[in-house]
Image (tube, rainbow, N blue to C red):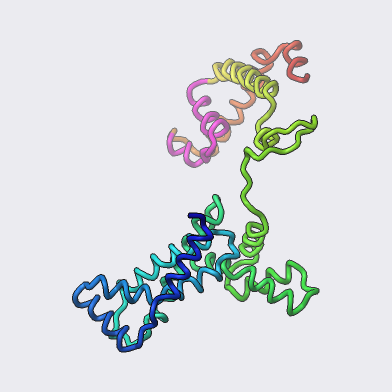
Amino acid sequence: MNAMSVDRHIIRFAMAQPYLEREEEIDLAKRWKNGQDRDARNRIAYAHMRLVIAMATKFRGFGLPLNDLIQEGYIGLLEAAARFDPAREVRFSTYAGWWIRASMQDYILRNWSIVRGGTSSSQKALFFNLRRLRAKLAQTDSHLTDQAIHQQIAATLGVSVADVQSMDARLAGSDASLQTPIMGKNGQGVEQLEMLESEELPPDEQVRGKIDGERWSKWLKCAMERLNDRETRIIRARRLSEDGATLEELGAELGISKERVRQIETRAMEKLKTALSSCGPTTGELRELAT
């Protein structure tokens, strides 16, 4: 049985269900609430399948199968039937509408794209209303720019313009598999994955960077051996640490003033410069680094 025949079967079943009078609806709700009568709950649900189908058709624009939307809506309908309290004196259709809509919307958000969108109430409102509001504004004034449209939608829904722009871009596009075949530069078909540009450096530059890094580490280690323990501690804390200790912190640790720490640091830097002239690269290594 294909999807279209399933849709027709569900629709025929829904249309064949009898409407419930208000008194009968209340009686069935009480039977379920007080006695857990499943038959009473199911009769309430079946009688409102038309409501599920009507809501499902409104969400067909998101490209998901109608049959799946109806099934998700029916789950929401059963949840509404299980929670309905006849003492509130509202018609079941009014109460069930929220549950049916919420169930379908959650399904759409989970399955519309492999990239999960925001699940906050504001993001949901933006997702499900952006197209409608954009079309309405375009009909009102065909000369509105995208920026003006985004600003008005943001004001209407209480979200940022950046959120509207991001959602508009998502809704305008669609998911694409990285295995999708495309035409390569040589005229042969390749997968899209093979055409993605890597953000990493080319292999030869990676190897060169690693070798250069090892050389500089060796030269620095040689120069650092010319410093005494206190100078080494200050240089490592001040110059070779990501955080960079303050003069006050090192002074408290070493039991000296911050001015004395600054003087030792200055002297140590001068010693390092002198040491690097003897420990540093040879003329040949400098030429190699420059190439």
Residue 83 position by quadrant? bottom left
Residue 277 in magenta stretch: no
Residue at 67% across, 23% down: 203
Residue at 69% across, 14% down: 281
Viewer-side residue, 8 vs 117: 8
Residue 138 placement (x, y as % from top left): 73, 74
23 displayed left or right of 37: right
Residue 14 placement (x, y as % from top left): 43, 72
Residue 72 placement (x, y as % from top left): 44, 63
The part of the chain drawn in magenta is: 228-253
Q: Is residue 145 above or below residue 27?
A: above
Q: Is residue 249 above or below residue 36?
A: above
Which residue is outermost to the left?
35
Viewer-side residue, 206 vs 32: 32
Q: Magenta residues: mostly which secondary structure? A: helix
Residue 280 placement (x, y as % from top left): 67, 15
